[in-house]
Image (cartoon, helix red, strand yellow):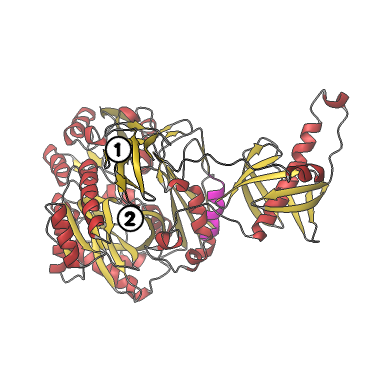
Amino acid sequence: MFKKLLIANRGEIACRVIKSARKMGIATVAVHSDADRAALHVAMADEAVHIGPAPAAQSYIVIDKVMDAVRRTGAEAVHPGYGFLSENMRFAEALEKEGVVFVGPPSPAIEAMGDKITSKKLAMKAGVSTVPGHMGLIADADEAVRISREIGFPVMIKASAGGGGKGMRIAWTDEEARDGFQSSKNEAAASFGDDRIFIEKFVTQPRHIEIQVLADSHGNCVYLHERECSIQRRNQKVIEEAPSPFLDEATRRAMGEQACALAKAVGYTSAGTVEFIVDGDRNFYFLEMNTRLQVEHPVTELITGVDLVEQMIRVAAGEKLPFTQSDLKINGWAMESRLYAEDPYRGFLPSIGRLTRYRPPVEAAHATGVVRNDTGVFEGGEISMYYDPMIAKLCTWAPTRAEAIEGMRVALDSFEVEGIGHNLPFLSAVMDHPRFASGAITTAFIAEEYAGGFQGVTLPETALRRVAAAAAAMNRVAEIRRTRITGRLGNHERKVGDDWVVSLQGAEFAVTVAADRDGATVHFADGTAHRVASDWTPGQPLARLDVDGAALVLKVGKIPSGFRIRTRGADLKVHVRSPRQAELARLMPEKAAPDTSRYLLCPMPGLVVKISVEEGQEVQEGQALATVEAMKMENILRAERKGVVKRIAAAAGASLKVDDVILEFE
């Protein structure tokens, strides 16, 4: 077995590999850019080597710099993680030439399967059903439009060397094909150093289901069942689960056997993933093969009990797989939610800054449930604009799908993140969505269910009453604390009343709080009541309560006359007032928000790539106004209505903050 392993990556996946290597007694080497000097993966590794400036194109994907780190540390093997150099044939060849083991497939397999165009041709030759498309490279935007028309809209424009949603666009019109081609080309060049683009038919109402394969160098290949990855936004997976709620055993077996046959055909070893599009009749079509470890591998590990990173290392060391296909059973159900540094209330645009609070739920594993959090950040750390916005992968396991979803709901409510925009509210909203709970999902789920963007969560009245009861009980605890402050009223405790009015989400409830030493019973005016028990004390940012025997987890902040409460994706201002205070509050006018309709504001911190209009120009609804790049993604900002450009306040190359003015309309 290897004595020293270098991880050619960063963030949570580097931390994940280090954990398995440490368990196996293997020393680890981290590499890092200027931006990652204090990163978690650097702190976890036994050694660390600086490899360049913050941009990945000047550090993490520069083969010579990584190779120099390998030589300097004497690493015997390199694990590439995912992204960066993980599917770069030249990197695998450079390691081979140096006599260093690449923890991944042989370079010919990377060449055959890593390139999406080549892999599709090989799959077709092998008799695998593939999605219709143009297998050649696209020269320019005009050709992209012509080919898109020939295939028939909608089409998917994709980077040949792409992955992780980078360099991908869906086009429904000539204009979208033209814009999408250029954006995909730019993103591909920045993310992978390869700007080749191809186009294929976009299959509507598909499910994205992938098969995890694992092969050794002794001719053995197994599939570790499937993952459902249909909850996607901008072609980037958001929630994954294993197994799929859609497949039957016959389809699962057919997909798995086909995935293994394809892997054997190209001499594949190590872990890899064969991705399929599956239609409503369970017909499946080969999409691509990822010749690396997948982001969502934890859900497969949770249902099979196999440490995929460990097996990759053992296969790379020449060992045989310790199990056969018949040994691999599906045990229970696993969910994965990707926590992104992005603001769901601003169209999921990237968010950067310092994590002023980062407290994941406690990881635990027992017979009826597992909570796992793969992360690469820490409280006080910086979220950089230079890398992918994913900061953690929260996973739960339980014997059934419904129990795994409920476990995820509680875990999401328990996850404390402050200082940046993040998608925790959206993840909670999906977990509570009836369509998701039923398993009737497709890759169009987010586009269909949140067509107007994410506007937050409106809690149903049953949930609202539970929160109101909890807030009333918590307010009583806070009021008692306030009356006991030394020096107040000559050290005599002020009596805390029992009658309160709780207002939240536009609703108002008159309640009476009857407290005892074990909790409080909150009576509503209509005769209903809720029993609330908790050990919460004022100032704690997380409240774990029991309401009528069911768990309720609230993130709690103080506001005048109440609390800011976040739960199940809802962000609520909850006012708890005496009846007289509530009467007066109803007379107070509401403050109007400032009018920013005449301005195009930067929706995220980023770099202005292009200004597409001029001062005095008339623009139409939907017309491109500017392009802003953040976290390796280009975002085209479009006009919301017809107007005339009065002033341009930012130029290409400018670095902007959130809400900086880009241009002003007349």
What is the CA distance from the residue labelled 2 to the residue labelled 1? Answer: 35 Å
- 63 sits to left or right of 574: left
Percent position (x, y) of residue 571? 58, 47
Percent position (x, y) of residue 535? 71, 43
Q: Which mark is residue 235?
A: 2
Decide: few, some or many residues near mark 2? Use Cα within 10 Å; few <14, some 14-19, many ≥20: some
Q: Which residues are magenta?
A: 404-415
The C terminus - image quarter: top left
- 224 sits to left or right of 453: left
Q: Which mark is residue 615?
A: 1
Helix, strand or loop at mark 2: loop
Q: Which mark is residue 441?
A: none
Q: Amino acid at mark 1?
A: Glu
Name the residue located 18 percent from the left edge and 36 percent from the top edge.
63
Name the residue located 72 percent from the left edge and 57 percent from the top edge.
548
Mark in front: 2 vs 1? 1
Name the residue located 49 percent from the left edge and 68 percent from the top edge.
438
Q: Is residue 449 magenta?
A: no
Name the residue located 31 percent from the left edge and 44 percent from the top edge.
625
Please say if 196 is above or below 650.
below
Quadrant of the image occupied by residue 287: bottom left
Which secondary structure class fits the magenta region best? helix
The N terminus - image quarter: top left
Q: Is residue 414 magenta?
A: yes
- 480 sits to left or right of 662: right
> Mark 2 vs mark 1: which is more N-terminal?
2
